[in-house]
Image (tube, rainbow, N blue to C red):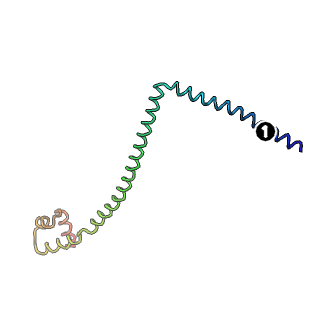
């Protein structure tokens, strides 16, 4: 029982001493703060202004980068769609129709130059189709 009373007494004593020290230190902090605000130089004010300006600029740049990355992601999606459309257009172009047209025009004894002009294809392609048709 005596130990408990002794521990409680020591605890109260420590709290009272620390409270007294806290009051002394808190007034010291106020003095340091007042002293620091009084001794701020123009250079320190300019440094703070520059920091604020840089922070604003960095914030704007981050927003621009975010917007640009979203735009790039959107463009990548449309590029994939456009590439698939282009591939489909080439795969559906009438190559077999040109072969049939060349065969039909050769049977009608149309000259190779005229076939090239009519179908808007190269002379080599017409000659190739003609040679393959003969075989």
Q: Quadrant of the N terminus?
A: top right
Q: Nearer the viewer, residue 100 or 45?
A: 45
**Residue at 64% from the left image edge and 32% from the top image edge:** 26
Identify the residue shown where x is 13% and y is 75%: 107
Query: Which quarter of the figure has residue 124?
Result: bottom left
Circle 1 is placed at which residue position? Answer: 12
Between 115 and 38, the one lying in front of the other is: 38
User: Residue 37, image x and y in percent?
Assistant: 53, 28
Which corner quadrant holds the C terminus? bottom left
Q: Nearer the viewer, residue 16 or 98?
A: 16
Q: Secondary structure at mark 1?
A: helix
Q: Residue at 81% of width from left, 38% of height from top?
A: 10
Count of marks, rendered view: 1
- In the rendered image, residue 44, in percent from the top left (x then y), is placed at 48, 28
Tell me the crowding category of disc 1: few under 14, some 14 to 19, or many 20 or more residues within 10 angstroms, Cα based: few
Picture layout, residue 80 above or below residue 32: below
Most extreme residue toward the right, as rendered?
A: 2
Tell me if residue 83 comes above or below residue 68 in the rendering.
below
Which residue shows up at 27% across the image and 69% down it? 92
Image-based side of 79 in relation to 97, left or right: right
Tell me where residue 33 appears, x and y as whole percent: 57, 29
């Amino acid at each position: 029982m005596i130990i408990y009373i002794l521990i409680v007494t020591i605890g109260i004593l420590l709290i009272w001493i620390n409270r007294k020290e806290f009051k002394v230190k808190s007034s010291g902090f106020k003095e340091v703060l007042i002293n620091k605000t009084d001794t701020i130089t123009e250079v320190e004010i300019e440094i703070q202004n520059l920091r604020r300006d840089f922070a604003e600029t960095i914030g704007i740049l981050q927003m621009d980068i975010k917007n640009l990355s979203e735009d790039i992601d959107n463009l990548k999606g449309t590029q994939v769609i456009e590439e698939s459309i282009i591939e489909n257009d080439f795969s559906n172009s009438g190559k077999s129709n040109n072969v049939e047209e060349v065969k039909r025009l050769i049977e009608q004894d149309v000259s190779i130059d005229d076939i090239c002009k009519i179908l808007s294809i190269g002379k080599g392609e017409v000659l190739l189709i003609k040679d393959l048709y003969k075989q």
